[in-house]
Image (cartoon, rainbow, N blue to C red):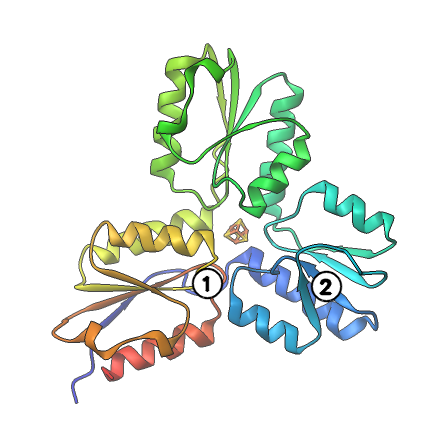
């Protein structure tokens, strides 16, 4: 049987922040006797979260009923209100926030302290964005797309940051449009380098294949973004695991491209690659 040619995107496996969060958690599993919780999933990959659950790490959405133990702050961070609640309960906090996510919070706070109206280019309700909002303790404006700009609500001094997983295109478009409505604009490009590399590589591959497969959690912002980018170029399927792959998708295809989100484990990527290569 012919082996289907597969083109792999660069930076396929865990990113720096995800590796770091998993290492911190695995050290806690080895060294701590107490119950271990994460506020929300540690990373946005259901298979990894399930695996951690098997090792005793429970993802919770609130702290009700938790009286003791360790609370790990996930890679995308959490709002300070949750941190305060955990401290008040006497829980031990372990911070696995990615340093790049923390940088966005710090820059947003410095903008606020300098008197700028803070605008976050990001997804309303995403934990990272909620974390930034909580950190600066002020009503910042969250914009997902340029059409959401309300000129009357834009101040004379505006400071902009981006959720780490945004696309550069969207960020640039929003910044360009904000310029029309403000006198002073200070912009920090806080999109994570890793995100930009993955998006660039995925788009490049999507342009030269017949089909793209993007692997990663359906709840992962960066994977969803990758899938959207690829979809702009070629037919794309976003899958979490090899078992979702359908043989019909590959029929008649000459070249398949594969990209993966920053929280997708290598074993899932390898399974998908092997299944695609086998053409089954
Ligand atoms: S994608 Fe970037 S910001 Fe997000 S966890 Fe990975 S390294 Fe950190």
Q: Which mark is residue 37?
A: 2
- Whether 237 is drawn above or below 193: the answer is below
Q: Earlier in the sequence, mark 1 or mark 2?
A: 2
Image quadrant assignment for residue 181: top left
- Whether 102 is drawn above or below 189: the answer is below
Label 2 element class: strand
Determine whether, in the image, residue 224 is placed left or right of residue 70.
left
Determine whether, in the image, residue 14 is placed left or right of residue 68.
left
In percent of width and height, residue 117 lies at 56, 20
Nearer to me, 32 or 71: 71
Residue at 53% across, 46% down: 126
Sort mark 2 into few (<14), some (14-19) or many (20+) by Cα contacts within 10 Å: many
In percent of width and height, residue 107 lies at 60, 31
In percent of width and height, residue 140 lies at 57, 27
The total number of labels drawn is 2
Nearer to me, 72 or 186: 72
Establish whether ligand 1 lies closer than 8 Å to the Cβ of label 1: no
The quadrant of the image that shows the C terminus is bottom left
Determine whether, in the image, residue 241 is placed left or right of residue 237.
right
Residue designated by label 1 = 217
Label 1 element class: loop
Image quadrant assignment for residue 13: bottom left
Which residue extends farthest front?
Answer: 65
Residue at 59% across, 50% down: 76
The Cα atoms of the two marked residues, 1 and 2, are separated by 20 Å
């Amino acid at each position: 049987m012919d082996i289907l040619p597969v083109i792999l995107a660069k930076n396929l496996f865990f990113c720096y922040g995800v590796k770091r969060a998993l290492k911190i958690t695995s050290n806690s599993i080895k060294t701590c006797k107490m119950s271990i919780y994460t506020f929300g999933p540690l990373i946005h990959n259901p298979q990894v979260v399930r695996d951690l659950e098997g090792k005793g790490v429970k993802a919770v959405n609130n702290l009700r009923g938790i009286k003791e133990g360790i609370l790990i702050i996930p890679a995308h961070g959490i709002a300070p209100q949750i941190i305060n609640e955990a401290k008040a309960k006497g829980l031990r906090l372990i911070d696995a926030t990615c340093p790049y996510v923390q940088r966005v919070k710090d820059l947003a706070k410095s903008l606020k302290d300098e008197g700028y109206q803070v605008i976050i280019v990001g997804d309303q309700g995403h934990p990272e964005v909620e974390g930034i909002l909580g950190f600066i303790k002020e009503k910042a404006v969250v914009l997902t797309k340029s059409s959401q700009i309300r000129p009357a609500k834009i101040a004379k001094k505006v400071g902009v940051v981006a959720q780490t997983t945004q696309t550069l295109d969207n960020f640039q478009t929003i910044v360009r449009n904000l310029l029309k409505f403000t006198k002073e604009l200070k912009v920090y490009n806080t999109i994570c380098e890793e995100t930009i590399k993955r998006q660039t590589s995925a788009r490049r591959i999507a342009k030269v294949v017949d089909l793209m497969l993007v692997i990663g959690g359906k709840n992962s912002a960066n994977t969803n973004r990758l899938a959207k980018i690829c979809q702009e170029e070629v037919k794309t399927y976003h899958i979490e695991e090899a078992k979702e792959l359908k043989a019909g998708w590959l029929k008649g295809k000459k070249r398949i491209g594969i990209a993966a989100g920053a929280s997708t484990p290598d074993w899932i990527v390898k399974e998908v690659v092997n299944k695609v290569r086998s053409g089954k």
